[in-house]
Image (cartoon, grey):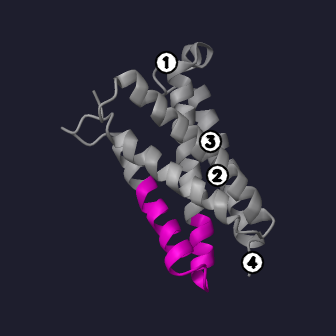
Amino acid sequence: MLLGMSLETFTLVHVVLSLAGIGAGFVVLYGLFQAKALDGWTAVFLVTTVATSVTGFLFLPVDRLLPSHVVGILSMVALGLAIVARYSFRLAGPWRRVYVIAAVVSLYFNVFVLVVQAFLKVPALHALAPKQEEPPFAIAQGVVLVAFVVLGTGATKRFRD
């Protein structure tokens, strides 16, 4: 039992948080392209994405460092930067760019994990890449990475004072 919940219930909570974070993240990203801060959506994105990362650590074995730990740690660093840039420095000066990049990176990590989980859980995708070392998995993750680099670059240019 995790936090007084069954593993199934805890997993459901984690997945709902993750999907809510991804959905809110794409709304925030749209706002960045429109040069709008979208305060409410930003709060939902940051809170649900932090909660996703925190709950994700509770699934993992703690006896050794795994790639999932590394992704979680990197996500928390990016989220920390986004939160500080947004709420402590109020997007002033270079913190505006730090916020955009950190928010986009945080969203990317959530989508990266979504792709990993899709290849683990969706039978058709799992058949294409059962070890997640096969070309279909690499191509999918490559496409996601390139898309986020393009989106992040565009958001950074468009989200101005």
**Contact, CB < 8 Å: mark 1 with mark 2?**
no
* Type of the residue with mark 2: Gly
Q: Which residue is mark 3?
A: 142
Q: Vertically, is 124 above or below 56?
A: above
Q: Which residue is mark 1?
A: 130
Callout 1 crowding tier (Cα within 10 Å): few <14, some 14–19, many ≥20: some
Question: Residue 86: which disc?
Answer: none
Q: Vertically, is 108 above or below 4?
A: below
Task: Please report the residue visible at 49 percent of the width from the left and 18 percent of the height from the top.
Answer: 130
> What are the residue bounds of the magenta stretch?
75-101
- Whole-percent x, y for residue 16 in the image: 54, 35
Q: Nearer the viewer, mark 4 or mark 2?
A: 2
Name the image quarter holding the C terminus.
Answer: bottom right
Measured Cα–Cα span from mark 4 to mark 2: 18 Å
Q: Nearer the viewer, residue 35 or 121?
A: 35
Task: Please report the residue visible at 53 percent of the width from the left and 74 percent of the height from the top.
Answer: 87
Q: Nearer the viewer, residue 157 or 55?
A: 55
Q: Secondary structure at mark 3?
A: helix
